[in-house]
Image: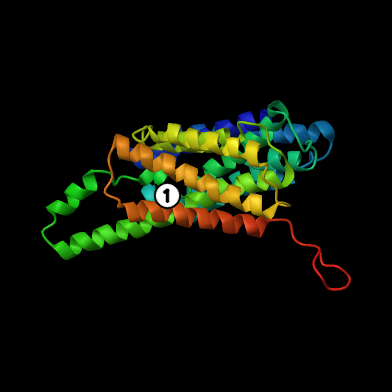
């Protein structure tokens, strides 16, 4: 749990730094309060993990990835400072795709996932929320980290369409340009729904391979990431946070009622199809009532069906492999 507290400090620092890169025009140096918060979180996390290693005289179970992540992060941090000095301070999508930032992303994923890896081989199959919470926070922070680096795709951050895009298109004098803009925004938007579905559904399926998770798992998993994403845009899309919590509640109810498991492939697949349907139903319902949308019923319906098919396909891929018998049959 202490690892997760320090990890939360580290990730919140990353999101605040991301907010600065997105909203401030005066970032001209590597040495900013936002970087200070981010790197102080890393320093605290590193100090804690080093202390744990020294205390037991070995790397704690499941924390080899964290140690590797600390080394990679330190090297990436030096590289990031050098990159900023040579090429300047990135903004928006450039900041997400900066090579040194991607090194930091991979390093953070290794660090933040360690409590989950530790719990994988030590925690009981039916854990209580109290015992499962460090692992749950761990995977939730990794999901938030992944969505942070996919900001240009996820609808929980960049669905700026709503009612203003119609007015923008209407002001265009060239109808072909307007139609091209609309088509491009649709294609980018559709990809964002599918990618976000996979980022949120895959961790749930991974958890179900190992545990029968306590009620509230999906609520935390969905709620943490969407709340952090909303903060990047100064909570302009805050109404989407309750939508994510509602989808998490539906997912938890499905887990309790269906009891999905990779050994029950059909139920497992059905669960993985219903989760994105509930997620995007809550999402679009909120969008329609709060902002309005120019997306047609065909586009919205297509998002629901395609996301469901993607979730179902992922569930089948992650299902327990069949056992091949000595006679060559499948058991």
Figure quadrant of the N terminus: top right
**Would you call the spot at circle 1 few (<14 residues within 10 Å), some (14-19), or many (20 or more)?**
some
Q: Quadrant of residue 179?
A: bottom left
Residue at the spot 67% in from the left edge and 30% down from the top edge: 133
> Looking at this view, is 25 or 280 the one in front?
280
> Mark 1 falls on what kind of element?
helix
* Residue that badge 1 annotates: 95
Relative placement, left or right, of 114 versus 250 is right
Residue 106: x, y in percent? 59, 50
> Which residue appears farthest toward the right when viewing the image?
326
Q: Is residue 223 above or below residue 298?
A: above
Q: Is residue 129 above or below residue 247?
A: above
Figure quadrant of the C terminus: bottom right
> Looking at this view, is 199 or 248 the one in front?
248
Residue at the spot 42% in from the left edge and 49% down from the top edge: 95
> Which residue appears farthest toward the bottom when viewing the image?
328
Residue at the spot 54% in from the left edge and 47% down from the top edge: 274
Residue 135: x, y in percent? 68, 36
């Amino acid at each position: 749990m202490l690892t997760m507290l320090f990890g939360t400090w580290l990730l919140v620092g990353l999101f605040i730094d991301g907010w600065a890169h997105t909203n401030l025009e005066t970032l001209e140096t590597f040495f900013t309060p936002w970087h200070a918060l981010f790197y102080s979180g890393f320093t605290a996390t590193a100090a804690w993990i080093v202390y744990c290693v020294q205390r037991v005289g070995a790397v704690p179970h499941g924390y080899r990835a964290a140690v590797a992540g600390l080394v990679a992060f330190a090297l990436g941090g030096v590289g990031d400072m050098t990159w900023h000095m040579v090429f300047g301070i990135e903004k928006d999508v450039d900041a997400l795709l900066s090579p040194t930032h991607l090194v930091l992303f991979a390093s953070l994923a290794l660090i933040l996932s360690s409590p989950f890896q530790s719990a994988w081989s030590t925690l009981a199959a039916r854990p209580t929320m109290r015992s499962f919470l460090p692992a749950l926070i761990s995977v939730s922070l990794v999901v938030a980290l992944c969505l942070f680096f996919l900001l240009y795709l996820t609808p929980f951050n960049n669905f700026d369409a709503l009612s203003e895009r119609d007015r923008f298109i209407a002001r265009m004098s060239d109808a072909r340009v307007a139609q091209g803009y609309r088509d491009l925004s649709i294609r980018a938007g559709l990809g964002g729904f599918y990618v976000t579905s996979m980022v949120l559904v895959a961790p749930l399926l991974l958890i179900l391979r190992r545990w029968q998770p306590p009620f509230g798992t999906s609520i935390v998993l969905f709620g943490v990431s969407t709340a952090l994403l909303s903060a990047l845009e100064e909570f302009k899309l805050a109404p989407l946070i309750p939508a994510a919590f509602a989808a998490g509640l539906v997912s938890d109810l499905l887990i309790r009622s269906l009891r999905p498991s990779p050994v029950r492939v059909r139920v497992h697949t059905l669960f993985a199809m219903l989760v994105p349907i509930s997620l995007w139903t809550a999402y679009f319902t909120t969008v329609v009532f709060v902002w309005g949308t120019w997306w047609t019923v065909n586009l919205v319906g297509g998002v629901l069906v395609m996301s469901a098919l993607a979730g179902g396909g992922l569930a089948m891929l992650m299902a327990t492999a069949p056992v091949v018998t000595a006679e060559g049959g499948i058991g």
